[in-house]
Amino acid sequence: MIIQGGMGVGVSNWRLARAVSQLGQLGVVSGTALDQILIRRLQDGDPGGHMRRGLDAFPFSQMAERIWKRYFIPEGKGERMPYELAAAHSKDNSRDLIELCIVSNFVEVFLAREGHENPVGINYLEKVQPPHLPSIYGAMLAGVGYVLMGAGIPLKIPSMLDRFIEHQDAHYILHVSGVQEGDDTTMHFEPHNFMEHHLPPLARPLFLAIVSSNTLAATMLRKANGKVNGLVIETRTAGGHNAPPRGKLHLSDAGEPIYGERDAIDISKLRELDAPFWMAGGYGHPEKLREALAAGAAGVQVGTAFEFTEESGLREDYKRALLAKAAAGKAHVFTDPLASPTGFPFKVVRLEGSNSEHDVYARRPRICDLGFLREPYRTAEGGTGYRCAAEPVSIYLAKGGKEEDTVGRKCICNALMANIGHPQIRNGPRMEKGLVTAGDDLNNISRFLASNRSSYNAADVIAALLAGQPPV
């Protein structure tokens, strides 16, 4: 009945997903930027030896060992030393980067599945397309039970899952701005080129599409190129990226997007689609779960309540500060229409000393060196280039971008890495600041705290949400 939301980057980590799945609900790891997360954990010395354990379980030992030897630092990198980065993704990724995608997704899912027999899911953003093929294959090698995908229209994912069952070649079309007829925008992945020995067929994970409207729900079920096993219906109160309002964008006096009747979800029409669906966005309450079930939903997806659990990957200082604010009723979430380079509204939590504070971010040089949210575009020569509205303005303009699209943009990629305790070091003492995102329900998370406790865990959330529910 409960899907734990796949909050990236690294907030929905293997620890959180494992805790939720062990309790009989669906734990979900975030699949975003797992390649960069793995190598930062290795450069930090692999505390606890968890990455080594995951690498030892990987079926192709030579590939795993190459990554270990390249990135592992026994005592951890120096406090003021920057992380070594993997290359930014592109249409034609190098073999090293493809291997890193396969292995990192395997490791995260393997660790989340360790010690129990219940299914685990992985969540991807359709918008972040270049890593899709090897990432999903790596997750399937680890036996992932569910693949969830939103932030776009993932019509072509189901057939990819079908082909990877038998380790068959697969392809995916990269969305390129300005593409012309005859341009080659197809990404290819051939598992047999990376296999060190024969493997039996893999299990096909169930596929859940994350959508924000009745129209997209119907489109996924009717036009996908394979079986869609269910839908997550995410409303605009959910954290992270939100779907923009339909029609012309209007802002409130506070500067937030205004949503109207056209953006509302008609649950009666969802029932007519005859597919299981879960409601998301503000459903982290037992009465909202009861409401969803009564309306015909299979359950709910909950993110914000799990974001601040002891098991999540969010930095402890951010957890403590925001739990205190929530307990006092003073936590504030702003739906920022400009922050994300994607142009989609992005929920930002007001937190002193982070990139959510304008003056802090304004002093940050515009650097784009991770590039997950870069926009592929057609170059004058007919090739594929990449630009980001948060990179240096002059560079963005030279790539054909518009200056107005750079206003207010933040480097979400580096900020989200800082959120989970892996901030990049710049010029010695300076390090990247975080940018915390959460749903509009943030002020209500303190209800999970017992009277004499300053923290709570995944079991507390599940017990509270299931209060009054009949046993399954």
Image (tube, rainbow, N blue to C red):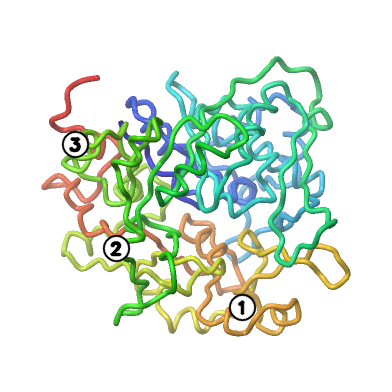
Q: Which image quarter: residue 429?
A: bottom right
Label 2 close to label 3 by CB (< 8 Å): no
Q: Residue furthest right?
A: 381
Q: Residues within 10 Å of mark 3 (few under 14, many from 20)?
A: some
159 or 412, which lies in front? 159
Q: Which image quarter: residue 255?
A: bottom left
The percent coordinates of residue 394 (x first, y second) are 70, 84
Query: Where is mark 3, residue-wise?
Result: 290
Q: Residue furthest top?
A: 200
The percent coordinates of residue 306 (x first, y second) are 33, 45
Name the image quarter holding the C terminus: top left
> Please, what is the three-letter code of the amino acid marked with disc 2?
Ala
Q: Which residue lies at the image location 64% right of the left edge and 74% below the top edge?
A: 367
Circle 3 SS class: helix
Q: Between tags 2 and 3, which lies in front?
A: 3
Q: Earlier in the sequence, mark 3 or mark 1?
A: 3
Query: Where is mark 1, residue-wise?
Result: 366
Side of 394 where 124 appears, left or right: left
The disc placed on residue 321 is 2
Q: Which residue lies at the image location 60% right of the left edge and 74% below the top edge?
A: 390
Is residue 83 visible in the rendered image? The answer is yes
Side of 261 where 407 appears, left or right: right
Label 1 close to label 2 by CB (< 8 Å): no
Circle count: 3
Q: Which residue lies at the image location 59% right of the left edge and 20% below the top edge?
A: 203
Q: Earlier in the sequence, mark 2 or mark 3?
A: 3
Circle 1 SS class: loop
Q: Earlier in the sequence, mark 1 or mark 2?
A: 2
Name the image quarter holding the N terminus: top left
